[in-house]
Image: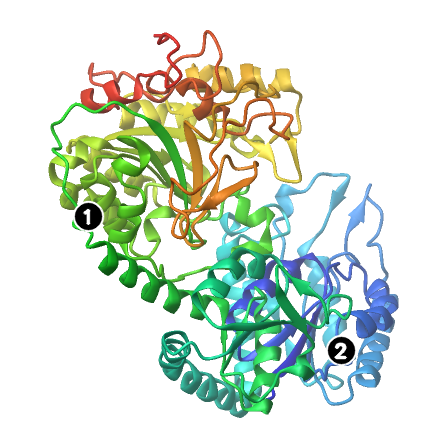
Amino acid sequence: MNRAGILFLGDSISLGYRDIVKYNLRGCCEVLFPREQGKFASDLYRMLYEWKKYVTCDRQIDMVYWNAGLWDVVRIFGDEAQTSVDDYKKYLEKVCLRLRKLFPKAKICFATTTPVVEERYTDEFFRKNSDIEKYNKAAECVLKDKVDFFDDLYSFMQNIEAKNYRDATHFTYDANQKIAAHICGIIRNTFKDEIDAVVQAEQLRVSNINKVIEDVVRNKLPLVTWGAGKIFNEHKNFISSYCNLKALVDKDRRIQGSKIDGIQCIAPDDITSDISLVVITINNFDAQCQIGDICNKKNISWCTYEEFMDCVWRLYEDEMLKKSNYIPEDCDPDAVEDMKKYIGISILENTCNLDCEYCYLRTNPNRRYEDIGRKNPHNPLFVRKQLSRKALGGSCLIGLTASGETLLADKFVDICIELLKEGHYLHIVTNGTAVAKIEEIINRAGKYAKHIIFKLSFHYIQLKNKGLLEKFVEAVRVIEKSQASYTIEIMPHDELVPFISEVMDFSMKNFGALPHLTIGRNENDKMKLLTNGSFTEYNDTWKVFDSIMFDMRMKLYLTKGRDCNAGPLSFFVDLYSGRIDHCVYYENAGNLYLDGISGSKLDKVGDSCPMESCFNCHVYAPFGILPMEDVPTYYTIRDRKKADGTNWIKDDMRRYLDVKLDGLKNNE
């Protein structure tokens, strides 16, 4: 089934919406674009040859959606626009003619330059909307009759409010979603018949795939995996031991004919007709579709690794629970427990209703569109069994967080309840906007609610821009009225500096105390703080919050971990794959679902950590996992006494968190 090929070319505005378009059209169309932006119209013209060669790789392109103008209209030090109107028109026409030559079957769509927020520019570097309008008019004059679609994005975005801009020029994620939806509408209308045919074929495949997988697994029918990368390595042991894995398929000729951990590697052409299923172990949607097309031509069933593992995990866990005759015993919620370990659990969820400037998902755009709305294949009861008090040696503090909003993850509440009944205490990270989920957790937990602390990440600017500040306050009120505890944390960054007084006033009025502060790190260089200023400037700016946590983190910044007890006293689990790591940046120790805790190699990290600075020092040092003198307990760095004399952290949780796991004396 042929999918339409859509090529995006343009400046930094296109960088904001093209990934969203790609995600929205996944499976329906193949969306391509170069890594770099087009900059000036002349640059776009110059780069077409390379992009044709290296981006499209001779794949038929059915539509080219392009724009140019943002760089051409910029004024520096009061000069005229960088490109004259006449030169701009000349290069637009040359680009259009070249596109017709390079992609003769493609529909050509030109998008006008979008409006800017003039008052946010400096006198040295600025753009004017009057210039943009003039250049857009020139573009219309020269291209209107030469392109198939002339998309007036300027008019489409002209009345958008300034709060929907990240800076003077670029849009927020929400605004880019609006543009992307508009562009997707053009593409869907243009290729309606082709898209409908692709969608119908995929719906038919998906409706039957679980039955195919179950049949292959239960009857030990032969299957192959396709792709020798990270995903294959993560799942190969389980697939090869639980299923009839015949071979690994890969296009890399260097490994064809060899064996990887005893598994024969073959070329795609060597897939034989007796193979019942091809499992695609590649996390790239376009690649999955291309491989699926190859399998369809061979009349062989195929599935993605997500579809396969979702089904196989369910079969495996049901079998293990049945074999073990596992019957859980709920712990007494009033029993006095001592913490034995800290366990960090990574939840599979990249969906988020906020778009923070410093967010990991923004700085890693390829991750943003992975795992959105993914279903959790694991049985909450099996998760509980593998993390039982018996397996762990007693009650543990379990930290639950996702790359997106944690509370939106599938089966999250069910898993929380099972872990609470097992006798564990939970540290749940949330942005405080999913109030209904917070209420559900608290209500279902009942008396176990006192074993929960919500870490509320206070993303002030995003909450304010989206009108969600009162929703955040509502979340605080819900927790305050329950037996659960909470702590409020802010990520200090340069964009927030003008709002410091406003944040402090709002916090005292609504939370009875100031938020605690973490420290931000630059995702491109994790040794650097999230600021353009110096260490001293950063510290002096944010110390007004009088946060013990911030003071501790600044004190330990760039401190190398020594004699670290990660492993015996702490480890991290990827809830989806089951992978167990000693620490976020330390080596793999085993698999929760296959090896269990007892079968994992959780030896002490000691002085072997490869990181120059401990990224988990805000947890490891307070709990004594990273032994250090004169470091306050975790309770101390998370709690605040409110103006009314009450505390964020209630008594039962205070007692549980006010400890040192390595036996060092508590530091009040």
Viewer-closest of 51 and 614 = 614
Q: Is residue 508 toward the left or the right of residue 366 in the image? A: left
For the N terminus, the image quarter is: bottom right
Image quarter of residue 119: top right
Residue 339 or residue 394, whichever sits in front:
394
Q: Amino acid at mark 1?
A: Glu
Q: Residue furthest front?
A: 262
Report which quarter residue 475 is drawn in: top left
Residue in the image at 27% along x and 49% along y: 415
Q: Which quarter of the figure has residue 5?
A: bottom right
For marks 2 and 1 on the same chain, the one whose residue lies earlier in the sequence:
2
Q: Residues within 10 Å of mark 2 (few under 14, many from 20)?
A: few
Q: Secondary structure at mark 2?
A: helix
Residue 156 as seen in the image, left or right of residue 396: right
Report the front residue among 203 and 602: 602
Specify whether residue 159 is in view: no
Which residue is denoted by mark 1 in the rendering? 440
Q: Image height check: is 321 above or below 289?
A: above
Residue, disc 2 = 141
Q: Is residue 606 visible?
A: yes
| Mark 1 nearby-residue class (10 Å; few <14, some 14–19, many ≥20) | few
Disc 2 to disc 1, C-alpha distance = 58 Å
Residue at 52% of width from left, 55% of height from top? 173
Residue 279 is situated, as x and y percent measured from the top left of the image, at 52, 73
Q: Residue at horizontal 41%, vertical 76%?
A: 213
Q: Position of residue 308 (x, y in %)?
A: 44, 70
Q: Quick one: quadrant of the C terminus?
A: top left
